[in-house]
């Protein structure tokens, strides 16, 4: 099975449709699949739902898809760094499903393991619990959270071999593994593709069985908030 593609547009060819659910890796601007996001913008796909910890910042990352109004709904944990996100949400243009960060990660991971739902204490007694099934275990309430089964996963890794085994670099690991696992198809962009067999099996963070297409590219590595001290 060929997994290595020449560009982000080629890797996404035949996978996109209006109204689809996309799981995107990354945390802030760390470990985001920026090349694949750019290709989504260029594709013109619309009315999409995106499951991701946040929506980037104004004009970069997933924020680009907000600027073009291609996103209909976000499933997120943190949205405080994007003024356009706030504007669209408050004006009713954008739907938002808030998730505690651990719950969002587990919803992705659960789907990747074929688990349709799980019970958690997180969110009990808050708006997060509204409309959800509640069960009592050992005298305490838990709410049912459903797995996120995405149509497409887009993730960013440091290295891959030609069979799709992935290694993430430091905190760029964040939401990328669970996001990769929960999609029917996973496309990964990486900084380097190495020959099959050259990666230490013990160093692999995500096995290639979860990864269907790979691209290699250059990345901007923008800093989300730069704080410096005076000279």
Image (tube, rainbow, N blue to C red):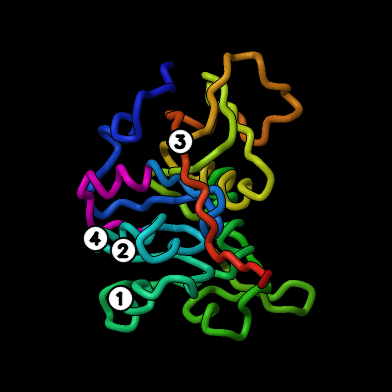
Q: Residue at x 43, y 36 (%)?
A: 187
Kindly give the residue lying farthest to the front in the view shown: 231
Task: Give the distance between the C-alpha atoms of the residues marked 4 and 2, in whole angstroms.
Answer: 5 Å
Task: Pick whichever, 165 or 219, lies toward us.
Answer: 219
Task: Determine whether label 4 and label 2 are within 8 Å by CB.
Answer: yes
Whether 158 is drawn above or below 64: the answer is above
Which one is earlier in the sequence, the residue at label 1 or at label 2?
A: 2
Which one is earlier in the sequence, the residue at label 3 or at label 2?
A: 2
Which one is earlier in the sequence, the residue at label 1 or at label 3?
A: 1
Task: Determine whether label 1 and label 2 are within 8 Å by CB.
Answer: yes
Mark 1 lies on residue: 88
Q: Residue 176: x, y in percent?
A: 56, 46
Q: Which circle marks residue 218 in the picture?
A: 3
Q: Residue at x 69, y 45 (%)?
A: 170
Mark 4 lies on residue: 68
Mark 2 lies on residue: 66
Residues rendered magenta in the picture: 36-49
């Amino acid at each position: 099975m060929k997994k290595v593609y020449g560009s982000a547009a080629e890797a996404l060819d035949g996978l996109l449709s209006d109204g689809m659910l996309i799981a995107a890796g990354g945390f802030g601007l760390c470990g985001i699949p920026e090349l694949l996001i750019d290709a989504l913008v260029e594709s013109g796909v619309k009315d999409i739902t995106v499951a991701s910890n946040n929506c980037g910042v104004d004009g970069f990352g997933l924020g680009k898809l907000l600027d073009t109004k291609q996103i209909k709904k976000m499933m997120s944990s943190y949205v405080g760094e994007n003024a356009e996100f706030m504007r669209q949400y408050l004006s009713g243009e954008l739907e938002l499903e808030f998730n505690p960060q651990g719950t969002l990660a587990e919803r992705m991971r659960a789907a990747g393991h074929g688990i349709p739902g799980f019970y958690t204490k997180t969110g009990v007694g808050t708006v997060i619990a509204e409309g959800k099934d509640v069960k009592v275990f050992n005298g305490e309430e838990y709410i049912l959270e459903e797995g996120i089964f995405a149509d497409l996963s887009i993730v960013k890794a440091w290295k891959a071999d030609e069979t799709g085994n992935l290694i993430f670099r430091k905190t760029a690991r964040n939401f990328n593994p669970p996001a990769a696992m929960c999609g029917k198809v996973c496309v990964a962009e990486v900084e380097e593709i190495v020959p099959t067999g050259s990666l230490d099996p013990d160093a692999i963070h995500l096995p290639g069985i979860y990864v269907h297409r790979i691209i290699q590219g250059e990345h901007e590595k923008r800093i989300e908030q730069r704080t410096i001290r005076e000279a």
